[in-house]
Image (cartoon, grey):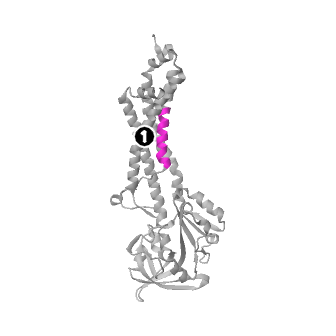
Amino acid sequence: MLWNLAFRNLTRNRRRTGLTLLAMSMACSLLMFTLSLNDGNLWSLILSATDQYQGHFRIQSELRESDPDLNHTISDSLPEVFKSPAVDYSPRLRGMFLMSSGTDQDMRSLPVEILGIDPDREQKITSLNQNLMAGKPLGKTQSGAILLGKELANKLRAEIGTEIIVMGQGAQGAIASGLFTVQGIFSSGDQMRDTRLSLIHLDDLQGLIGLPKQIHEWVGKTSDPLNIDPLVQNIRFMTPQFSVISWRDDMPQLATVVDHWFIVQIIVIVIFYSAVILIAANTMSMAILERNKELSILRALGLKRRFVLKLLLTEGFLLGIGAALFGAAIGGGLVAYFYLYPLDLTPWFGEINWGGLALRPAIRAWPQINTLMSPLILICALGVAATILPALNILHKRLYQALGER
């Protein structure tokens, strides 16, 4: 009976109930969409910062953290303790060389960093081997091929097929030198990095500097980079002989943005629902006040205040449930569309350079459980909360005051 009475009371004035339901539904759907857009922008920022070169975390020798010596290496066999279905790893080996191209009459030389990668594993972590301006990526096996950053290729005046001479220090103080052929020119999204970085196959670099089966670091990628700290702390606990560095350690400015993002979402929620609670409270106040004498007569006939309070709170709850269902349908549809089909704004605004990163502006929604469910839970609670004050106000009136002279 309670639910039937509450539903009939809401449908008394269908226009007013419908407008209130529409306002609450739109607030719920817009909040859901706004929070998902904020998360989409945040995820785009993290992906731009980590997917092009950085990775989500890296594991290296404890000695290399304080002294980046060439000989401070670890094995290129992934330890069993690191293996997890939720994490991908890629080995990397680094070396500093003097790179030269051209003829004796027009020789150009630059100090560069050569990064040795496993192409199959690297493509699961970053897009370094795929972000090509020209040429083709490194193959599965060593081939004497090299990829140059676009700015480095410009300075060396190197093109596809150009022969490159590299000379530098090998392991244990030996001299390392080699001849490579430019197979591709890539862009990492960072102009400074593209000026000094080149890529070759891991086996090629291990042979060049004399470090067989050795690497400098494992670069990892997890499915949830926002919650990277528990994973990093777990690896540090299990393997104290290694140094584990997350993207938060390498990019503290971006980590600060992420840490403050929750506060921004709270502010957005408060702004949205400050307006909605006023609308809902006004509607429920009007709906209760116009039934003042009716409820007072029922109380005079013996209806308990507790039942009247339950009836009014049920009406508010039904209003919140209805708004949550309509809001979920509208907001969920918008989130799903802009998650599957993000709107790329690059043709109108171009790439945005921030902190050495090239970001592609886009309207993208990123659905998460908390951003999808919190507006629904809040709107249901809001329907009840907006009913409490007017309900208590009318129930605290004495019957003779509510009935007047009747």
104 drawn magenta: no
**Farthest residue, direction front:** 1
Residue nearest the observer in this picture, 85 or 260: 85
Name the one closer to the observer, 155 or 391.
Answer: 391
| Secondary element at image label 1 | helix
Tell me what residue is drawn at x 42 percent, y 37 percent.
Answer: 323
| Amino acid type, callout 1 | Leu
Above or below, 262 against 388 in this view is below
Residue that numbered label 1 is attached to: 325
**Which x, y percent locates residue 108?**
43, 83
- Asked if 186 appears above or below 382 in the picture, the reply is below
In the image as oriented, which residue stretches furthest toward the bottom? 104
Numbered label tally: 1
Evaluate whether residue 363 shows in this view: no
* Magenta stretch prevailing secondary structure: helix
Residue 357 in sight: yes
For the record, the magenta segment spans 369-384
Residue positioned 55% across, 82% down in the render: 209
Mark 1 crowdedness (10 Å alpha carbons): few <14, some 14-19, many ≥20: some
- Magenta includes 376? yes
The residue located at (46%, 58%) in the rendering is 45
